[in-house]
Image (spheres, rainbow, N blue to C red):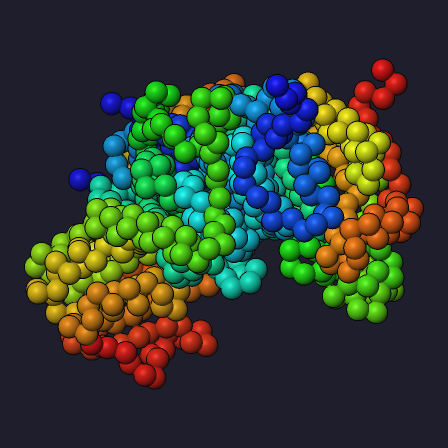
Amino acid sequence: MAQPLNIMLAGFGGQGILFAGKIIAYAGLIDEREVSWLPSYGPEMRGGTANCSVCLSDEPIGSPLVTEPDALIAMNLPSYERFIDDVVPGGVVVVDSSMVGACTMRHDIEYYTVPATSLAEENGLKGLANVICVGKLLEATGFSTEEVCKQAIDKSVPASKAQLKDANKRALEIGEAWTASVC
Amino acid sequence: MAELLFERTKVLTDAITNYCPGCTHGIVQRLVAETIDELGIEGTTIGVTPVGCAVAAFNFYTCDMAQAAHGRAPAVATGIKRARPENIVFTYQGDGDLASIGIAETIHAATRGENITVIFINNAIYGMTGGQMAPTSLPGQVTQTSPYGRDVATAGYPIRVCELLSSLDGVALAERVTVDKPANVRKAKKAIKKAFEYQIEGLGYTIVEIVSTCPTNWGMTPAASFDWLRESMLPYYPLGIYKDAKAGE
Amino acid sequence: MAEKVLMKGNEALAEAAIRAGCRHFFGYPITPQTELAAYMAKRMPKIGGVYLQAESEVAAINMVYGASAAGVRVMTSSSSPGISLKQEGISYMIGADLPGLIVNVQRGGPGLGGIQPSQADYWQATRAVGHGDGHVVVFAPSTVQEMADSAASAFELGDKYRVPVMILADGLLGQMMEPVILPEPLADDALPKKPWALTGHKGEREHTVVNSLFLVAAELESSILERAERYQQISRDEQRAESFLTEDADVIVVAYGAASRIARSAVVKAREQGIKAGLIRPITLWPYPKDALEATLASAKAYLVTEFSTGQMVEDVRLVVNGRKPVSFFAHTGGVVPTPDEVLEALRLANEGEVFDIIPFQGKLTRKKEVQNG
């Protein structure tokens, strides 16, 4: 039985935070686990920040609101600053270092920096920094498998954007393969 | 053997109405009933009654009837019509109901082109509650709540409903009539029938405004109330067709 | 078996309503129920249904009144301030014995309040849903699956008893996604017959009247009493609740909807710490599931109520318990969602025999001065 994993994803509106969370949630569903996905909502999402709580567990999920994340994906500085201290000791943090210049002062967590936005642009995957971060989180936590995450991408990408499925899968692979420098 | 010259209007029940002597509700209600009968739509018609003197009209018609909250008859009629587009749906509303508390429902049903027929009784006063100022009470008109006469500086101006609605694209027919004498009663009947016919054709929202009397709350005899209607109301509320989708055809 | 899909609570409820035969939706935009109306706007035209954005909440509920009077399955959805506007129409629906589904995806109040999850409309739903002497049946789902399932139950009970039904959700349940198995669509011929509906009499029957006006007091009384009999039957037959680990529990948490999810986490944690905790989760709020609570009174030592309000459902629990056991209370409100650890702490206190009412006060959790207890 896998450990329950409570994940917080945070960044600017438009970075695909909610979509990244949806891939993780769908992976959990395909793995036949209990999952929940909860976005921040309201004017906040147009005011700049978006965040999303995702829970994966083998037991029914109580509160879907992640207040003490086991894992954090932070895609901008305000999000990093807002959530970094909430991460549980031993937790995994993936930051988009193209957007977050900060090195962490915490030494009790696994901290990965991925220049996801730059990597996305270099690889012709503009807008898929989010999925690159998911790839790194997958590699760091093993919350599911690459195969399942690719199936989850197939489920999450809307039919109207089906041509983007492959790009999303490549972004996932790039994130998984990135050997981040822990600062 | 005696020849039958006049019989009780079909589509009206035996119930005795609650209307006062000289009130024109009875005439208008009968015109609506005759129209439904003549068009042969009694079996498919659903009426909606307001809150006001006509609240109990659900007892007077033999077709299916719903009673609506104050001002909400157009919304209730919308719900019925959207659920049963094949049925004929009409509302019967007074001026407080239609032009005050229900003006939003009225304007929006009209602008949606909701395919319903609205029979609008404008007698410039709240009848059932005992004679308060209505949105259509005339400037200077004395009522229980405008005891010194309607002062437009503080109470504002009356609403001319047909003029207001005629600017909306969803309106197929907006016509103002009265029933003060036989010739006008015949014209009113014609307008009401046209409104129902337009609905049957699916042309959109139709409204017939009937300038009416309220002798009890106006404090007049029935005869005097008709004089007042002609002298005071008709100049402010001119009779005529304000919108007709088929004008010029 | 049908496929499990990931859906938002608002959308799952909407789709389930369609599958329960609902083809008419009348609404008005408000956060956080937006996705429900948007889903209907997208789906209804494709299945020959009606989605109509009304000019106001007031108009929307009266359109529901009209469509229900015409005999179809119909619904509206809104959030707290919008429900206040609908209360007039809900009262008329009760008075005219019209079924219909009203969804309240609650947000913080009073006034414009906030948009975060809240349970502050419990009293409105169960005590004062409109003027006059009446009730609506109230469902309180706690998962996305239950959001879907309660839509079917709502239409079924509404038609069976000719009463409006409310689903009392909140922003959290509306916005979150969980896996859900959607119910199979109901066949058209499986819908109940409604001989009372306005259809046009076609010359085949007497005219039908849908009405809530009775000017003769005795007639109004008899119509209310006839309805009260149905309410009694509903209270007897339709109480629903989930009992979780209650059999040997010393302390029982009572919580509904989103709050019950947090309470469940706290109960699980408490068990890990050796505290014999259990959970009663009302699924119907009216009728209140008194029987489930009553069944635990002999064995439980204490009760803890937690909800997202300063104390509304706790009164129903105290009515059932009626002084026989201590009932404590812990809550956040205004859109602040308590953490499982906070509830666990309250649970631990209750287990140690303390009796308390703890509510947020000036940003801190503070005990009310006067402790109400059994």
A105, above or below A18, in the image: below
Measuring from the top left, give residue A48's x and y in whole percent.
Answer: 59, 49
- Name the residue furthest front: B1
Q: Name the outermost residue toward the bottom.
A: C369
Residue at 36% of width from left, 41% of height from top?
C162
Q: State left or right for residue C23 relative to residue B202.
A: left
The residue closer to the viewer here, C58 or B226, is B226
For residue B89, side relative to residue C370 (left or right)? right
Q: Position of residue A61 (x, y in %)?
A: 28, 47
- B144 and C95: which one is in front? B144
Give the quarter of the image for residue A34: top left
Q: Where's residue A67, x and y in %?
A: 37, 56
Please state if B8 lies on the left or on the right of A91 as rendered: right
- Residue C7 visible (yes or no): no
Q: Residue at x 29, y 48 (%)?
A: C230
Percent coordinates x, y for residue B177 in the rendering: 81, 36
Q: Is residue B131 visible?
A: yes
Along the horizontal axis of the image, is B164 left or right of C161?
right
Seen from this angle, which residue lies furthest top?
B249
